[in-house]
């Protein structure tokens, strides 16, 4: 039975590949995204898509991170995770790397408006740093579960706050006025960086295997 | 009609409001159940108010297609919102204990936000993210405050949800590759044909049928709906599975040309029949109350697939699809809430051993009876309206076998609902438990069931809403 | 399609199929979860290939979609791991 299903999936994949090869690619939205970018306040096209054109997608995605962090925390068995990396090398490494990680994350966040970078990249790096601290036994803030969840919601809060504020002023949710769009985007991204990092930390804590 | 607040505000509010509530549950953890319940009722009020905004659309962030994402509220979307909102509101009121579990209130509000986002969504990728919000919230809620069986069922549900979402996402990627567009209206105007149309449609349909629990992809549904807390089961059966089928409907009606739906019709009809038979027989043989109700959901989803199979030939079949969705949502949620109370009063939920829980459970028993009638399709309930509409349209399309099949399915439903009813009439043993849930639960169940009954009289307005040209 | 694009598309579809197979057919939950991740990688790879335009001009929209997809998949994986832990501990009681 398993073999039959496996063969079925293989055939489906072949059919998909054939269909993709047979279909000509459309030109896509690259030209349009670049031509309208002036109104977004940023010059990195991917950031413009994520934080302006398709900002609503990003809002919902931050909701996913938040809800997963809350759910994982609620569902995981409540056993404290023992420090997993022991020894002077690990502790020294954590101490040396953490400031650099935080600085680099800040840089990635800042540069995201002009060059590859942005909230998600910064948050991933920051989360890596937080997890490194967690794993060597130096539990980083946020420490309590309730606070971690609240911080995880910062990205959603920023989006909702900005979105409603501009809607009250202009009429449409998340319709940034071009003059301050860049600053608004940076504000949202800063909150989102903290939020996603906290969310990833919460997911890590919930997923850590115990004895 | 209320003075129309701008669609920009109302449509966005339908998603923003539950999200604000979600944040509220994090900031006020001890008040979380109250926040979630208040948000559910506020959502109901907002949906009612949104009736005046039907036909409106908004382009979020101020960018229209193809760069931006739109929300659209047509009659069809409003009807789906309109039957989902009372389920959330009444179930929340009936399930304070469940909402007090760690994380449950937050997940309840994100679930509402995701559901609203899907019904309003007009962008194919945005629908993927919405489906994930709903899937993850629902899978997590299945396990909240419940035991090992629910945890296993929730894990299986999560895998099914992921698989279905990724199948759908691959379809969206293929469509973007071929058209450079993600907005439903824009993609539809591009006139995809041949393998460029068939492949994404097939992938997306497989994924959405999986998420919707349509046979033969229903294996995950009875354990998940049968083991979750009663109000979660209510939300899962009534609303969550409908979101996947809603997206399926949009794909086949709005994106694909009518010829495609006509070509695929035999498949949907066959799947529908399969579901009705498999679900009905399993419900008849079910030993546990919630499993019985969950299998009943499998059968009732078959009706929706069957209706979709006739939607190309008869526009009335779309009305039947929606009517089945709405009637089932209201009846099934009322049934789950009532069943939860009755099981608690009995101390167990084994159908052969159930007894009359006592006079204090009057509303719950009435809810059971009315829901059973609606599910079996007895007049004048919404279930009857849906079956009657489908039977008429199918007959007009020449499929003479549909009407007798619906009648037979109705008898099957009546049979397993009758098993429940006879159990209710057995005298309880000496030490019967007193009513522990408070009267609110019983009345919530009865309200939902009555709404399913009321739906039967709303055939004309329903048809007008669903069939109106956008 | 250029040979390079053909190769990348084939790899993307292969990952998708293999991941789907692992998700559907594996017995162990952790393997299923990894299968879902591989499946996601396949879809994202296809989107990246789509982003490549003529003369090196890239389309930023699929890149943004992939970022969103990756974050959603990570969140779902995190939830899945917590649920796996719960099923293991609940069955011990």
Image (tube, coloured by chain):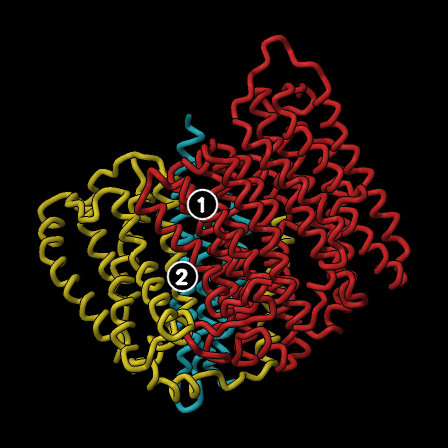
- What chain does badge 2 belong to? A
Q: CA distance from mark 1 to mark 2?
A: 25 Å
The chain to which mark 1 is attached is B
Q: Indicate whether A42 appears above or below A10.
A: below
Which secondary structure lies at badge 1?
A: helix
Reading the image, the residue beneath label 1 is: B38
Q: In yellow, which chain? A: A
Q: Classify B390 as above or below B300.
A: below
The one nearer the camera, A194 or C71, is A194
Left or right position of B132 against A192: right
Image coords of residue B420 (percent x, y) = 71, 28
Query: What is the x, y in percent for residue A62?
Result: 37, 59
Q: Residue C27 at x, y = what percent?
A: 51, 44
Q: From what the image shows, is residue A204 above or below residue A111? A: above
Residue B85 tag number: none
**Callout 2 environment at 10 Å: few (<14), some (14 to 19), or many (20+)?**
many
Regarding residue C13, the answer to whether it shows in the image is no
Q: Quadrant of residue A163?
A: bottom left
Instruction: Report the number of discs.
Output: 2
- Left or right for A9, reference C46: right
Q: What shade has chain C been given?
A: cyan
In the structure shown, which secondary structural element does the residue marked by tag 2 occupy? helix
Mark 2, residue position: A61
Within 10 Å of disc 1 (Cα), the crowding (few <14, some 14-19, many 20+) is: some
**Chain B appears what colour?**
red
Q: Identify the residue at horizontal 38%, vertical 67% (top origin).
A: C67
């Amino acid at each position: 039975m398993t073999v039959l299903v496996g063969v079925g999936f293989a055939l489906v994949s072949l059919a998909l590949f054939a269909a993709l090869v047979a279909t000509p690619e459309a030109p896509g939205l690259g030209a349009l995204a670049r031509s309208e970018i002036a109104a977004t306040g940023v010059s990195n096209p991917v950031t413009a898509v994520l934080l302006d054109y398709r900002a609503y997608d990003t809002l919902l995605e931050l909701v996913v991170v938040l809800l997963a962090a809350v759910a994982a925390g609620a569902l995981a068995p409540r056993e404290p995770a023992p420090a997993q990396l022991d020894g002077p090398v690990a502790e020294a490494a954590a101490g040396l790397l953490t400031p650099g990680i935080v600085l680099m994350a800040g840089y990635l966040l800042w540069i995201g408006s002009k060059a590859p970078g942005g909230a998600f990249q910064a948050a991933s790096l920051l989360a890596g740093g937080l997890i490194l601290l967690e794993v060597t036994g130096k539990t980083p803030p946020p420490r309590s579960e309730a606070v971690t969840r609240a911080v995880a919601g910062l990205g959603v809060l920023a989006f909702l706050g900005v979105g409603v504020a501009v809607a009250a002023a202009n009429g449409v949710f998340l319709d940034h006025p071009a003059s301050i769009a860049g600053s608004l985007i940076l504000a949202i991204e800063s909150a989102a960086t903290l939020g996603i990092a906290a969310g990833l930390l919460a997911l890590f804590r919930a997923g850590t295997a115990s004895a | 009609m209320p003075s129309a607040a701008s669609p920009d505000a109302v449509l966005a509010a339908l998603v923003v409001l539950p999200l604000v509530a979600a944040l509220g549950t994090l900031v006020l953890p001890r008040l979380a159940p109250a926040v979630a319940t208040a948000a559910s009722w506020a959502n109901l009020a907002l949906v009612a108010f949104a009736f005046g905004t039907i036909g409106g659309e908004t382009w979020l962030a101020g960018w229209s297609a193809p760069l931006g994402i739109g929300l659209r509220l047509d009659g069809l979307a409003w009807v789906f919102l309109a039957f989902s909102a009372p389920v959330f509101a009444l179930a929340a009121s009936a399930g304070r204990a469940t909402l007090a579990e760690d994380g449950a209130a937050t997940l309840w509000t994100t679930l509402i936000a995701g559901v609203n986002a899907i019904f309003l969504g007009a962008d194919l990728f945005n629908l993927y993210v919405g489906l994930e919000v709903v899937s993850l919230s629902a899978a997590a809620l299945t396990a909240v405050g419940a035991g090992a069986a629910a945890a296993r069922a929730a894990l299986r549900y999560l895998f099914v949800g992921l698989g279905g979402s990724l199948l759908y996402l691959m379809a969206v990627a293929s469509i973007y590759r071929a058209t450079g567009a993600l907005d439903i209206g824009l993609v539809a105007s591009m006139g995809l044909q041949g393998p460029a149309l068939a492949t994404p449609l097939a992938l997306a349909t497989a994924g959405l049928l999986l998420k919707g629990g349509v046979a033969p992809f229903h294996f995950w549904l009875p354990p998940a709906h049968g083991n979750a807390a009663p109000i979660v089961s209510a939300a899962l059966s009534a609303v969550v599975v409908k979101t996947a089928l809603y997206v399926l409907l949009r794909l086949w009606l709005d994106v694909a040309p009518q010829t495609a739906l006509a070509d695929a019709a035999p498949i949907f009809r066959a799947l529908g029949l399969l579901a009705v038979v498999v679900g009905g027989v399993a419900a008849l043989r079910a030993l546990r109350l919630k499993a019985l109700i969950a299998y009943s959901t499998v059968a009732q989803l078959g009706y929706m697939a069957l209706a979709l199979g006739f939607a190309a030939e008869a526009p009335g079949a779309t009305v039947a699809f929606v009517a089945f969705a709405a009637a089932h949502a209201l009846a099934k949620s009322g049934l789950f809430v009532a069943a939860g109370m009755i099981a608690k009063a009995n101390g167990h939920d084994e159908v052969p051993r159930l007894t009359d829980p006592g006079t204090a459970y009057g509303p719950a028993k009435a809810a059971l009876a009315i829901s059973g009638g609606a599910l079996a399709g007895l007049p004048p309930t919404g279930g009857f309206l849906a079956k009657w509409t489908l039977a008429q349209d199918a007959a007009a399309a020449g499929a003479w076998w549909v009407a007798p099949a619906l009648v037979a399915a109705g008898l099957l439903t009546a049979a397993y609902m009758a098993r429940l009813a006879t159990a209710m009439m057995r005298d309880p043993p000496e030490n019967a438990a007193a009513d522990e849930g408070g009267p609110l639960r019983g009345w919530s169940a009865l309200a939902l069931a009555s709404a399913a009954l009321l739906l039967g009289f709303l055939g004309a307005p329903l048809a007008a809403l669903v069939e109106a040209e956008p | 399609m250029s040979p390079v694009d053909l190769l990348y598309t084939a790899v993307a579809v292969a990952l998708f199929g293999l991941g789907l197979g692992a998700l559907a057919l594996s017995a162990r939950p952790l393997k299923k979860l990894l299968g879902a991740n591989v499946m996601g990688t396949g879809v994202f790879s296809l989107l990246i290939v789509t982003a490549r335009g003529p003369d090196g001009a890239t389309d930023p929209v699929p890149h943004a979609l992939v970022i969103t997809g990756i974050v959603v998949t990570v969140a779902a994986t995190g939830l899945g791991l917590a649920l796996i832990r719960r099923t293991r501990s609940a069955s011990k009681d």
